[in-house]
Amino acid sequence: MVAIGWQVYALTHSALALGLVGLAGFVPNAALTLVAGDVADRYDRRRVVQCGQFVEVVTGGVLAWGSFAGWLTVGEIYAAVVVLGCASAFEGPADSALLPAVVPADMLQRGAALVGGTWQSAAVGGPAIGGIAYAVAPGVPYAALAVLMFAALVLNGTIPIATVVRDEEPRSLKTLFAGVAFVRRQPAILGTISLDLFAVLLGGATALLPIYARDILHTGPWGLGLLRGAPALGAVAMTALLAQRPIASRAGIRMFQGVIVFGAATIVFALSHLFWLSLAALFVMGAGDAVSVVVRTSLVQLLTPDAMRGRVSAVNGLFISTSSQLGEFESGVTAALLGTMPAAALGGLGTIAVALWWMRLFPALRAVDRLEG
């Protein structure tokens, strides 16, 4: 994503073009997520994940080839993002539904924190190394994607699962939308995933990082890599803390507090002209977001029957993962209309407003106390 963002902005110098990257990833995710959830409940989830990773290996290889050969255009980058979005749509629900198969229910909060922390640890080094790699040659990060995703494909096949849960009910619109119906019946789940949807949608300042790095903070690809890695570093620190000291009480309130901190840090980042202050604000954004992620993941997995976890995870992904991509589009459009800094600051204010409103709208979520099986 460092390479895609920098390459698109270098070719176009357009905030709107950066926003279209998010839209290109959002459309296939939104269109395919519910189907992908049904697939995750009918087939071996490990194999579904591997199929998505195989597509990502091939796409990374094509992007690397086009960059090294010099024929890659903005339109072809958008097409690759669409393909990656299709792969992610199927990979995400199956991957999320695997967690309760390897973590006991009474340790799920710790497990969610460890999984999130492990992923974020990789995300800390990835963007920083990606910026340096892009400075060597634009095709290097894409080649790394292909090689490392192939390793992930192989390793996912070694996950031991005692039983493979499959939904044997004939396919119908009812089974396809069963996850949606389940979420509607669970106000705590509906509240937490909808809160994250609007928080990520409005707080999508990270989509504007290439503009901040190049035009406001006056740094290069290496600086962009550090900026992209800072939220992940904050998330790593918070998930490490939550893995050692899980939320023992008032989990719902803690989640709202995390979202408000995320919004406040977004405002600080939006108005900053200092590189170190921007890094610190992004670090705090990641820490606040990590609290929300751990609470949401634990609630969704604990309250969902195993045979439906793929479809409910798909709804969760539709709300959360695609909102990140749609948030990038929203940020690009708003920045093109209002300017980069006002757009990012407005997003932070909107995030805080939504968190305060959701506290009144979803009392069941506010009342969630302990996250145990």
Image (cartoon, rainbow, N blue to C red):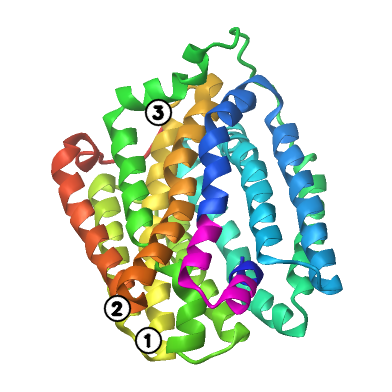
Q: Position of residue 192 (x, y in %)?
A: 32, 42
Location of the N terminus (image quadrant): bottom right
Q: Earlier in the sequence, mark 2 or mark 3?
A: 2
> How many numbered discs sit on the rendered protein?
3
Mark 2–mark 1 distance (CA, rounded to whole Å): 8 Å
SS type, badge 3: loop
- At label 3, the amino acid type is Leu
Name the residue at the top extreme. 170
Determine whether, in the image, residue 118 is placed left or right of residue 263. Answer: right
| Tag shown at residue 277 | 1
Q: Earlier in the sequence, mark 2 or mark 1?
A: 2
> Quadrant location of residue 369?
top left
Front in this rendered view, residue 270 or 302? 270
Front in this rendered view, residue 80 or 179? 80
Q: Up-down: is 152 above or below 213?
A: above
Q: Position of residue 301 (x, y in %)?
A: 46, 34
Residue, x 58% and y 23% (percent of image)? 38
Q: Position of residue 97 (x, y in %)?
A: 57, 34
Location of the C terminus (image quadrant): top left
Residue, x 78% and y 72% (percent of image)? 139
Query: Which residue carries the number 3 mark?
Result: 303
Q: How many neighbours does mark 3 have within 10 angstroms: few (below 14), some (14-19), or many (20 or more)?
A: some
